[in-house]
Image (cartoon, rainbow, N blue to C red):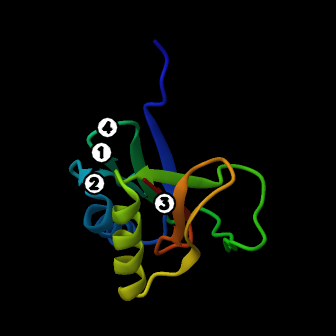
Amino acid sequence: MMYIEHLAVWTADLERMKAFYEKYFNATANEKYENNSKRFESYFLSFGKGPRLELMKKSDILDIEKNFENQSMGLVHLAFSVGSPQKVDELTALLECDGYKIAGRPRTTGDGYYESIVLDPENNIIEITE
């Protein structure tokens, strides 16, 4: 059987990103991996079900500004299922209250998802679905 084991994201602030996914999406992180000779650090985040998310930091990675309005080719977003429309609304409101950008208010999309869109601390697009 084939499945997605994990996805990886480069980050400028490893600890801040780890804390965001732990607080809002119930992630559990492994111990930090560090390779001093390559100046590389990472965490694997588990969410109880589905693929893990690897957060990676390396000082010489090119930082390209992400813009929700003008996206580019490649991986577009992560989607988290929270179980119900009410939980979508609640988590979206909490994130907004805590100062995170809401890029798409909760709604039912044309393909039938009830979702909202938020941006994580480094402007990665997160869909919150029922």
Q: Nearer the viewer, mark 1 or mark 3?
A: 1
Label 2 and label 4: CA atoms lie apart by 10 Å
Query: Do the numbered discs 4 and 1 sit on residues whose CB atoms are within 8 Å?
Result: no
Q: Position of residue 43 (x, y in %)?
A: 33, 52
In this view, 89 is above or below 8:
below
Q: Quadrant of residue 49?
A: top left
Label 4 and label 1: CA atoms lie apart by 8 Å
Q: Which residue is mark 2?
A: 27
Q: Secondary structure at mark 1?
A: strand
Q: Position of residue 36 (x, y in %)?
A: 35, 55
Q: Nearer the viewer, residue 8 or 101?
A: 101
Q: Which residue is mark 3?
A: 58
Rendered-image quadrant of the N terminus: top left
Q: Secondary structure at mark 3?
A: strand
Query: Do the numbered discs 1 and 3 sit on residues whose CB atoms are within 8 Å?
Result: no
Q: Position of residue 3 (x, y in %)?
A: 48, 24
> Could you say which disc has been placed on residue 49 in the image?
4
Q: Nearer the viewer, mark 4 or mark 3?
A: 4
Query: Do the numbered discs 2 and 1 sit on residues whose CB atoms are within 8 Å?
Result: yes
Q: Earlier in the sequence, mark 2 or mark 3?
A: 2
Q: Secondary structure at mark 2?
A: loop
Q: Amino acid at mark 4?
A: Lys
Q: Earlier in the sequence, mark 2 or mark 1?
A: 2
In this view, 93 is above or below 28:
below
Q: Earlier in the sequence, mark 4 or mark 3?
A: 4
Label 2 and label 1: CA atoms lie apart by 5 Å
Q: Nearer the viewer, mark 2 or mark 3?
A: 2
